[in-house]
């Protein structure tokens, strides 16, 4: 089954605007995480939200989680050109003990100066 | 800030050759992982390693793949006989003993099989 599918696949906005990316998943989870990847680089952890949490903030990032809908959203406020990157959600399935993450295909965010 | 270090950053090899990718996880971490990302596709789990043994592996991680932690710092991924479809970016990751769920990834090793 597909787990961690983001939409949109690509998003282009102007600097200063907010960017919202969504993620849907199919199986029960322990937590959901968002990672960022600059082109050709490694994955950088942004934020983790546990299955019993509904919303979490970190700086300009806001993540929501709706376990009834099996979906999450990542909001980046007041975007900057440096936010241009691919953003992935990753789920850690409930019942697992090895913290094996299942990644989505990602949203490519372009922030135009 | 502690980081996961991977070498080489890029390796080109001929089909059928053996390749070893090296990783130095964060020093006090206990859980280690290899993921791969074929160009333009999802990041895929390969294997997790804890307490000197494989704790879980995916169906991608067949008999051609192996992992080792030969000393207290290195964590290697070996591909015995590379195929064209092994061309990908390989990421090493580690997680601390607190089991927060947050993985720290290296910058990746790009493998090109010709």
Image (cartoon, helix red, strand yellow):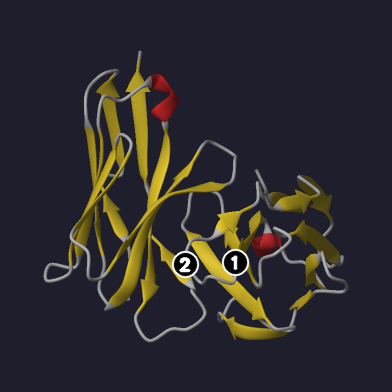
Residue B100: give its label: 2
- Asked if B29 appears above or below B37 in the picture, the reply is below
Q: Residue at x 52, y 65 (%)?
A: B44
Label 1: chain?
B
Q: Quadrant of residue A76?
A: top left
Query: Is residue A3 found left or right of A66 in the rendered image?
Result: right
Quadrant for the N terminus of chain B, please. top right
Query: Is residue A81 found left or right of B103 in the rendered image?
Result: left
Secondary structure beneath label 2: loop
Give whichever of B61, A113 is nearer the camera: A113
Where residue A110 appears, as percent x and y from the top left, is: 36, 28
Secondary structure beneath label 1: loop
Label 2: chain?
B
Query: Is residue A2 found left or right of A97 in the rendered image?
Result: left
Q: Are marks 2 and 1 in contact (CB under 8 Å)?
A: yes
Q: Residue at x 28, y 34 (%)?
A: A11
Residue A25: give its label: none
Residue B96: give its label: 1
Direction left: furthest residue: A68
Visible residue check, residue B111:
no
Visible residue check, residue B47:
yes
């Amino acid at each position: 089954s597909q787990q961690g599918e983001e939409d949109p696949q690509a998003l282009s906005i102007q600097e200063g605007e907010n960017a919202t990316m969504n993620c849907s998943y199919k199986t029960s989870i322990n937590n959901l995480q968002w990672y960022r990847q600059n082109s050709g680089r490694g994955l950088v952890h942004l934020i983790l939200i546990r299955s019993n949490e509904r919303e979490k903030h970190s700086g300009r990032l806001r993540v929501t989680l709706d376990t009834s809908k099996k979906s999450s959203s990542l909001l980046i406020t007041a975007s900057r050109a440096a936010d241009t990157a691919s953003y992935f959600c990753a789920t850690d399935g409930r019942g697992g003990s090895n913290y094996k993450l299942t990644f989505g295909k990602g949203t490519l965010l372009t922030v135009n100066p | 800030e502690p980081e996961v270090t991977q070498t080489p950053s890029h390796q080109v090899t001929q089909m059928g050759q053996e390749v070893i990718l090296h990783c130095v996880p964060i020093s006090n971490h206990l859980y280690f992982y290899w993921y791969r990302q074929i160009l333009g596709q999802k990041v895929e789990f390969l294997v997790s390693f804890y307490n000197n043994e494989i704790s879980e592996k995916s169906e991608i991680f067949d008999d051609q793949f192996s992992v080792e932690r030969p000393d207290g710092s290195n964590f290697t991924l070996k591909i015995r006989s590379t195929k064209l479809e092994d061309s990908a970016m390989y990421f090493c990751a580690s997680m601390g003993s607190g089991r927060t769920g947050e993985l720290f990834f290296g910058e990746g090793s790009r493998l090109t099989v010709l």
